[in-house]
Image (tube, helix red, strand yellow):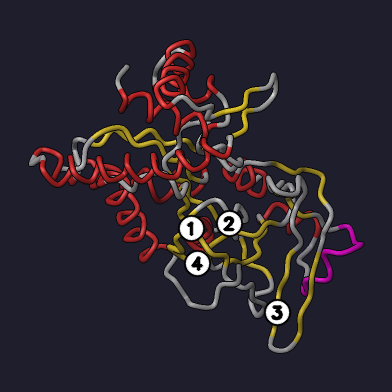
Amino acid sequence: MDRFDAMQAFARVVEAGSFTKAAHTLHMSRTTVTQLVQQLEARLRVRLLNRTTRRLHLTADGAAYYERVVRLLADLHDAETSLSAASAVPRGRLRVDVPSPLARTVLIPALPAFHARYPDIQLDMGVSDRKVDMVGEGVDCVLRGGAITDPSLIARHVGDLQLQVFAAPAYLQRAGTPLHPQALEKTHHRIVGFLWERTGRPLPYALRRGSERVRVEGRYVCAVDDGNAYVAAGLAGMGILCLPDYLSAPLRASGELVPLFEDWHFDPLPLYLAYPPNRHVSAKLRVFMDWVVELMARHAPLTGTART
């Protein structure tokens, strides 16, 4: 038994919550991972995990051992990194997940410069607006708008999105131009709905003008759960939509979208990079996060006023 492989397998099983998911992220067979954990238990002469048909549970000994294993694996990685000249250059496979519009308009266009700077990093970029099982899917970090509600993740505030309300000219020609946000409530006007992962329903618009505050639910005939589809629905005239500056600026300049309620404002929407606390922040992950911070400083700078 390779003790390092066994400890790594045990830690990943705990984090993933199953032998199958751990095996996938370690690129091993489920049988191999199971055998490694069993051999580790035999060597230690204690049971580390209680196994049922549905779930795995750490024993008291397993919980104490897991905390030490995580620290030991991180220390070992640090030692190897500090002693290896080759590892001074960030390298290896990095798995991230980012919102689809941000990937299309900001991150992917900037990737050639990132690759030129770090040619040995292989970037696997999941492009979605769904909630990701970071440990189970082996994802190193995610970039998300809005508060990070999972207390098990470490979140780094990297930007603030400035939001505004827009509509396509075709929509305004058909439905007329609403002059007040409350015109979106209980009238013929429609919004494009965005189905947020946490609620499964569109969030209301919360706008302010001086001391005046309004909260508009709006009604929709089309709701989607993908940012690019959301923009496409708005451009097709399916309803009024809310977009951040980085996404709306070119569409506004081309006349494809018209701003509404320009004297009303949203609170900025914070952007966060999040990663599991037990995931070692490798050189490749650190430089990727720093690169994202650089990009957001240009496209969604921190304002200090975002509410989470």
Q: Which residues are magenta?
A: 179-188
Q: Residue at x 92, y 62 (%)?
A: 186
Verify CB contact (< 8 Å) between mark 1 and mark 2. yes
Discs 3/2, front: 2
Q: What SS does tag 2 mark?
A: loop
Q: Gap between marks 3 and 1, in whole Å?
A: 28 Å
Q: Disc 3 to disc 2, how far (Cα)? A: 24 Å
Q: What is the C-alpha distance between the residues marked 1 and 2?
A: 7 Å
Which sits earlier in the primary sequence, circle 3 or circle 1? 1
Coordinates of residue 236 in the picture (x, y in percent): 67, 44
Q: Is residue 176 above or below residue 283?
A: below
* Relative to 277, 243 lies left or right: right
Give whichever of 271, 227 is nearer the camera.
271
Type of the residue with mark 4? Asp
Left or right of 166? Residue 188 is right
Instruction: List the single residue furthest toward the left.
Output: 85
Type of amino acid under label 3: Arg
Residue shown at 55% from the left, 58% from the top: 255
Residue 228, picture quadrant: top right
Q: Is residue 67 magenta?
A: no
- Quadrant containing the N terminus is top left
| Circle 4: element type | strand
Residue tagged 4: 160
Q: CA distance from mark 4 to mark 3?
A: 17 Å
Provide the residue designation for mark 3. Answer: 208
Q: Nearer the viewer, mark 3 or mark 1?
A: 1
Residue placed most toward the observer, 59 or 284: 59
Relative to 76, residue 155 above or below: below
Identify the amino acid type marked 1: Ala
* Label 2 sits on residue: 148
